[in-house]
Amino acid sequence: MLEDELNVSTRQRDGVAIIDLIGDVTTFAEEKINEAYRQVTSEGARHVLLNFRQNDYINSAGIAILIGIVTEVNRHNQKLAFSGLSQHFQKIFRMVGLAQYADIYQDEDEALQGLMPTAT
Amino acid sequence: MIMSHSTQIHISFPSVLGYEKVARDAVASFAKFVGFDSHRLEDIKTALGEACINAIEHGNLLNADLRVHVLCTYEHNRFLVKVFDQGLKDYNKATKPISIEEKVAGLGTLRGMGLMIITELADESAFFDESDGSSCLQLTWYCDLASKT
C-alpha cells in the first residue's frame, strides 16, 4: 500500500537510453531503478536519461539511489541527464549537488537536444 | 486564509516507512489552509517528510510498535512543526555530513542528505531532547517569508 508507487520502464530514442520513472522515488524504488540502469548499461547505453513523471514525492532515500546511479555512470564513462522534474525537485537536486554530475532539463525533448551533440 | 488565533493539529503514526507521506499530506493541507503559497507548501512537505523519516529510522529504529508524533501549530504567522520520537538513537548531530563528492567517490554512505535538506528548506530547525527521554525535531516557517531558491 505504502511502498509500491513507482513504475519504471526503459526505452531508446535518438541514441539515448531513457528510463521513465513514474511515481514516488523513495527507498522502495531502489531495486527497480538499479535494475533498469543495469539493463540499459548491459545493452551498451552511453547516454542515460532519467525521465521523471508524476513525482509528487522524492525523498533523501530516493536521492541516495540516484547518487548511486551517478557513481555507476562515472565508472562506466556514461553521460547522465535528468528531465521532467518539477521546479521544486529541480531545486532539491541542485541543493544536494546532483546537478554537478548530470544536466537537468525541463522535458525529454530538451534533454535529447542537449545530449544530441555528443550522442552517437 | 490567514488566521490570527492559535490553531493546532496532532498526527500520530507507527514507525513504518511510508507513513511519513500521510503526515506530510496532512500538514501540507493545514499549511495551505493557513495561507502558505504553493512553493512554500512544497518546501514544508519535503522537509517534514525528511523529519519523519529521521524519527522512524533513527529515533524509533523502525520499531512499528513505537509511534511518531507530529504536532503542528499556527500562530501569529508562525507555522511550527514538532516531530517527536523515542530518541533511541542519536542523529549524530555533531558529525560532519558527508558531501556528495565523498559519496560518489565511495567514501561514505549514500544516505544522509535528509538533515541538510531540512536545514535548507525550513526557516528554522533545531533538535531538542525532552525530559522524558524522547527527542523532538522542531521546524519553523513564517507565513510572510518567501520560499528559498
Image: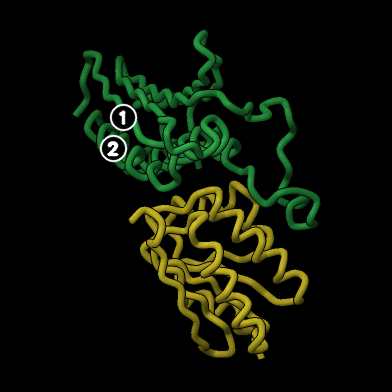
* Camera-nearest label, 1 or 2: 1
Give the residue type that dot 2 points to. Answer: Ala
Q: Residue shown at 57%/74% (left/top)?
A: A35
The one of A86 and B23 positioned closer to us in this rendering: B23
> Callout 2 environment at 10 Å: few (<14), some (14 to 19), or many (20+)?
some
Q: Judge from the rendering whether residue A86 lies leftward or rightward of residue A77; answer left or right.
A: left
User: What is the x, y in percent for residue B147?
Assistant: 43, 37
Q: Which chain is yellow?
A: A
**Colour logic:** by chain
Chain under numbered label 1: B
- Left or right of B116: which side holds B137? left
- What element does badge 1 sit on? strand
Number of numbered callouts drawn: 2
Q: Which mark is residue B11?
A: 1
Q: Is residue B42 above or below residue B122?
A: below
Between B101 and A60, the one lying in front of the other is A60
Query: Which secondary structure lies at badge 2?
Result: helix
Q: The chain coloured green carries which letter?
A: B
Q: At 42% across and 23% down in the image, what residue appears? A: B82
What's the residue at 60%, 82% (across, down)?
A39
Compared with B24, A38 (above or below) is: below
The residue beneath circle 2 is: B26
Closer to the chain start, of discs 1 and 2, is 1
| Amino acid type, callout 1 | Ile
Q: CA distance from mark 1 to mark 2?
A: 8 Å
**Mark 1 packing: few (<14 Cα in 10 Å), some, or many (20+)?**
some
Determine whether, in the image, residue A29 is placed left or right of residue A43. Answer: left
Do the numbered discs 1 and 2 sit on residues whose CB atoms are within 8 Å?
Answer: yes
